[in-house]
Amino acid sequence: MEAGNQTGILEFILLGFSEDPELQPFISGLFLSMFLITVLGNLLIILAICSDPHLHTPMYFFLSNLSLVDISFSSTIVPRMLVSIHTENKAISYMDCLTQVYFSMFFPILDTLLLTVMAYDRFVAICHPLHYMVIMNPPLCGLLVFVTWFIGVMTSLLHIFLMMHLRFCGDLKIPHFFCELTQILKLACSDTFLNSTLIYFMTGVLGVFPLVGILFSYSRIASSIRKMSSAGGRQKAFSTCGSHLSVVSLFYGTGVGVYFTSAVTHSPKKVSVASVMYTVVTPMLNPFIYSLRNKDVKGALGRLFSRVASCL
């Protein structure tokens, strides 16, 4: 099959994890369970934050946005894969694949930037507690979230714009369970130098620089905590940062794991399995991390369940 731009391209083939029919029910059940847990867990976090006035603070405003992004990211990938398994049809149209590429880049970018904003929020809260509400005022919080979404939209659109000018020919089988940009570039007949350059550049700008910002924020936070004379104050500071640090470690740890897996192995299946960690497992675990390690969220969830039970 040969085409210039998107014209003439009918479909790609997503090979998934395995072609063994006996494994399909297990894979389908596993991913359906993880997807439902992801949606339910993150939805409960959003509802708890929205319904509890005690959580109407900048930190939980950013957390609700992070939960929304996690739901959206999983919804971009998992339902399409489940339909493919159920219908035994691995084909995906060019435009559907392009859409999946867009959102599979867009939401991880939002994750990265929101985690950076949340680190800045913790830095202000602990290092400048008396000026926290003045600095982290509602207009600034709204602006920070808007900027993260704007950067995500424009960066993803730029990748899609370059991808739409590629020609594809021959075997259009993608050895993955979703349309992942680097895998699709391997199928292109035309030059992908600009696409690859943009990927490396944006990985540096939107991957490394936010991580440096997070590490800098926590270095200042650690310095402030050491200066605290009260053990209770130190414990409270650690408790407010512990959940965020766990999520950051999980997010970047899985991302680095996928990168090194793809670098050291030539097995597409191993890369696909590693990709499950950041596309499915991380969004599923985030609500547990925040609900189990954060007393405010646990209290809000308890009050939410109590109100629901009283209405039944």
Image (cartoon, rainbow, N blue to C red):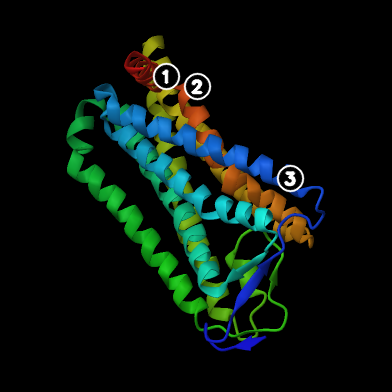
| C-alpha gap between disc 2 and disc 3 | 31 Å
**Lower sequence index among marks 3 and 1:** 3
Residue 145 rendering spot, x and y as whole percentages: 30, 48
Specify the label residue 95 is tagged with.
Answer: none
Specify the label residue 25 is tagged with.
Answer: 3
Q: Residues within 10 Å of mark 1 (few under 14, many from 20)?
A: some
Apparent side of residue 20 relative to residue 45 in the rendered image (left or right): right
Please, what secondary structure does the residue beneath circle 3 have? helix
> Can residue 249 be seen at all in this image of the molecule?
no
Kind of residue sitting beneath label 3: Pro
Q: Which residue is mark 2?
A: 292
Q: Which residue is mark 1?
A: 298
The quarter of the picture where residue 44 lies is: top left
| Mark in front: 2 vs 3 | 3
Q: Are marks 1 and 2 in contact (CB under 8 Å)?
A: yes
Kind of residue sitting beneath label 2: Leu
Please, what secondary structure does the residue beneath circle 1 have? helix
Name the residue nearer the viewer: 98 or 263. Answer: 98
| C-alpha gap between disc 3 and disc 1 | 35 Å
Name the residue nearer the viewer: 201 or 76. Answer: 76
Residue 147 rendering spot, x and y as whole percentages: 30, 55
The vertical placement of 61 against 27, above or below, is above
